[in-house]
Amino acid sequence: MLTVTFVRHGESEDNLKALWAGWKDAPLSKLGNLQAAAIGAYFRSVTLSDPSLKPHTIYASPLLRAHSTGQAIYDAQPDPKPAFIVTPDIREQHFGVAEGNPWTYHHPPDKTAEELITEGIYPVLYERHEKFPEGESLDDLQERAERAVKECVMPHLEEIQKKDDVGDDHPNRHIVMTSHGLCISELVGAVVRLDPSWPAGASEQYKGLMNTAWVRVVIEPRLGSFFFSYFYSDSSYKVRVTNFNEAGHLKGLSDENTDETANAEARAFFGGGTKALEAEKQSVL
């Protein structure tokens, strides 16, 4: 059995502003550093109480906010330390020419997105195929997430299965990926699709994470199931989402410097909570 825990990064300095910040790099804010320390302490306590959940490998986005969060988890782990691997495939969505520019979800109905961009206005793009010039669409991000799962998750599953094939007891393995709100939404979807028994679009419910909140997915090989292999010959995995948007480690932390009214929509969007914004869009059109 493989457990994968996806952790959103701590609050960055750009999270305090309503800016497009995908590949735009910014360090953790003061609160973000506290959040990272808290998630590190949480994972340490988990390791000490249940050694089977000690991370085998920590994968981190190279962007400062996620890398620092992953580093905090790594630093808090008792020896022997897990492997720490930086992979660009779990970076946030790239927003191209919009990077660093003001973010808005207001889209005047009498203007196209292209017209707004020429005016220096960068609205939320609601369709999965849409993207800013030089940037990525959600479809592009999905493709990158699929690649990340293939390169970072599948090797662990294959190793577990090889041990089973030779009759060895295969222990539970736990890997952690510190990434970004929108990217994690696509990563969870990519993992869920390993199990074709999930209905199409079912992973949409697992979107929208607070800073350093985590979502956990358990993947198990489907062994000895003739019925399942007959109908689903392309897959041998059972996938369960066991936890979503877990943030108990943040109890007692607060952000005294954040204007929640001004930034609530941006925080929801960059946390991966696009559905709420789509509903808001429909209510004003």
Image: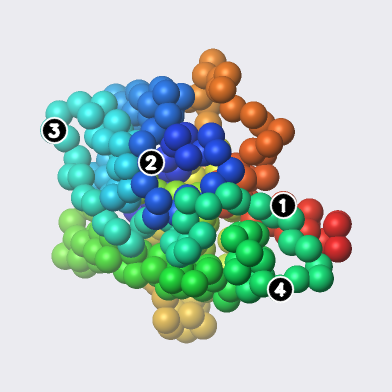
Q: Earlier in the sequence, mark 1 or mark 2?
A: 2
The residue to which callout 2 is attached is 26
Q: Nearer the viewer, mark 1 or mark 3?
A: 1
Three-letter residue code for mark 2? Ala
* Residue lying at 86% horizontally and 63% vertically, measured from the top left: 285
Q: Is residue 153 above or below residue 35?
A: below
Q: Nearer the viewer, mark 2 or mark 4?
A: 4
The kind of residue on which mark 1 rests is Ala
Mark 3: few/some/many CA within 10 Å (<14, 14-19, 20+)? few
Residue pushed farthest front? Answer: 119
Sequence order check, earlier mark of 3 and 4: 3
Please tell me whether mark 3 or mark 4 is closer to you in this view: 4
Q: Could you tell which of marks 2 and 4 lies nearer the N-terminus?
A: 2
Q: Is residue 63 visible?
A: yes
Q: Residues within 10 Å of mark 2 (few under 14, many from 20)?
A: some
Asked whether the beta carbons under mark 1 and mark 3 sit within 8 Å of each other, the answer is no
Instruction: Using the numbered discs, state the Cα–Cα distance from disc 2 to disc 4 in whole angstroms.
Output: 30 Å
- Label 1 sits on residue: 276
In the rendered image, is residue 184 in sight?
no
4 or 1: mark nearer the eye: 4
Looking at marks 4 and 1 on the same chain, the residue that comes earlier in the sequence is marked by 4
Q: Looking at the picture, how far across and down is residue 80, in whole percent?
A: 13, 33
Q: Which residue is mark 4?
A: 112
Between marks 3 and 2, how big is the CA–CA gap? 30 Å
* Residue at the image position 43 percent from the left and 83 percent from the top: 233
| In this picture, residue 226 sits left or right of residue 251 | left
| Residue type highlighted by circle 3 | Pro
As helix, strand or loop, the secondary structure at mark 4 comes to loop
